[in-house]
Image: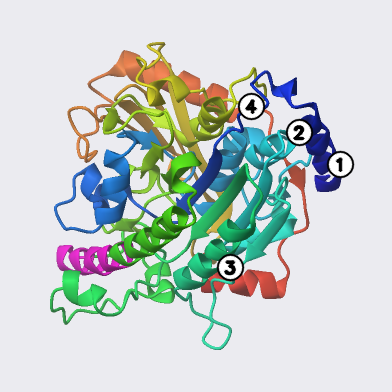
Amino acid sequence: MVGVRAGVAAALLGLGGACGQDPSVAPPNLLLISIDTLRADVLGCYGSARNTSPTIDRLAREGTRFADCSSTAPWTLPAHASLLTGTYPTTHGVKNHERRLDPARATLATRLLDRGFETRAIVNSHHLGDPRYGLQEGFRETTYIAELDASTRTVANCGEEVNARAAAALASMRQPFFLFLHYYDAHTAYRAGEPYDGMFVEPYDGPMKATTRQLSRYRIRGQDITGRDGRFLRQRYEAEVRRVDDLVEVLLARLDELGLAENTIVVLTSDHGEEFGERGGAMHGRSQYQEVLHVPLIIKGPGLATDRVVHEPVSLIDVAPTILGALDPRDETGFEGIDLSGTLRGEVFPAAERLLFAEADHENWIDRKSYADVVRMVRLGGAKLCYNEVLDRFELFDLELDPAELHDRLAEEPELARRLKLELRRFAAREQGGIAIPPPGAEQQKRLDDMGY
């Protein structure tokens, strides 16, 4: 598939004007940065006063920050598939470990490869690096840096290696290029080390070790995570976020040293957030609350607005069409997201009423019992309806009045609840995309268990 697309791309470059642009003016490069498990409200530019993110905060001032971006799923695989395809998990089909992306579905990488871009990915998660799931489609080269330490079977911090590989790629890639970078360092286990722990972590003598194995036991709602335990977990996590922020600083400095910064669109986002006992939960994957769905989205680039904040709700499905609109505007099909590149140039946000969805249906068998966690969400402006299929429970929140989702308004807003329930049922009834694949083998399942999946 890549070889065929590469030939098409070469032909397009030779034609020059085929893209409808001045052939003497190359489009900007694209650097897409995904920081796994990066909860928006832990960043300074999203409200934190903890100095966790000076580099990301500066990037936000230099570009456009989308204040209310929702993920499409609270875990890595389907959320990244949505990021790269501009479609919901139900549509692209990569909702669990037994489905892969259909090679016929266009991704951001295949579309840019067709336009003559050099495409590479450097990823730190097997969900992105394992060819069985299909997310490498369109990348001429994918480098997978294993997230597990082979000797200890625990998640390791590999951001320095991501940066080293990225620096080499930036120095060698032909322009225009698309480089996709994925950091896993903010994921459990929270082990930033010094000086980061000393910057954020207060003395603590409780039971929490902040390891993936331990926290996996707390993921079933109702187990007790005290306020003190939750604060400790969040502080350990904040240390990891600051560590990743410093890695991003090194990366962007290298981009500048190579003379690429002025002609590169930089996009920074995440697949999902993290829970620290807010409702008895830990880690991510099993709810639709803002702790796991609210993610950062920041876009900076040549000719784009600076120090702009967009407050309207957007989704990860909007990232791919927006990037394409900013790089090389043309009519595109196959997206459920919308092109928001006009907002990057200072235009008014499209005012049409819009539903946003998220879902998790990844066959994580709860406590090895006979049912799986299935949760979904629909939003209309600030109104948000969550549904837990296992418990058959709906919750309705007003995010404008109640951003922490503490007050269920289901009984108070029956007509709104009825409408959103209907929309959610329609969404859940859509035909699923993707291609069925065999379940993970014993070694693959052991790796998933070690990472909390």
The residue lying toward the viewer, choosing from 96 and 393, is 96
Q: Quadrant of the N terminus?
A: top right
Under mark 2, the amino acid is Leu
Figure check: 201 above or below 17 = below
Q: Secondary structure at mark 2?
A: helix
Residue at image x 66%, y 49%? Answer: 174
Q: Is residue 42 left or right of residue 213?
A: left
Q: Nearer the viewer, mark 3 or mark 1?
A: 1
Under mark 3, the amino acid is Leu
Figure check: 103 above or below 370 = above
The disc, 4 or 3, on the residue closer to the chain's N-terminal end is 4
Marks 4/1: CA–CA distance? 31 Å
Q: Is residue 184 magenta?
A: no
Marks 2/4: CA–CA distance? 39 Å
Q: Name the residue beneath numbered marker 2.
A: 13
Under mark 1, the amino acid is Val
Q: Quadrant of residue 427?
A: top right
Q: Is residue 2 left or right of residue 74?
A: right
Stretch of the chain drawn in magenta: 226-241
Q: Name the residue beneath numbered marker 3.
A: 448
Dot 4 and dot 3 residues touching (CB under 8 Å):
no
Marks 3/2: CA–CA distance? 42 Å
Residue 4's label in the rendered image is 1
Residue occupying the far front of the picture: 24
The disc, 3 or 2, on the residue closer to the chain's N-terminal end is 2
The disc, 2 or 4, on the residue closer to the chain's N-terminal end is 2
Q: Nearer the viewer, mark 1 or mark 2?
A: 2
Dot 3 and dot 1 residues touching (CB under 8 Å):
no
Residue at image x 67%, y 40%? Answer: 93
Q: Secondary structure at mark 3?
A: helix
Q: Name the residue beneath numbered marker 4.
A: 430
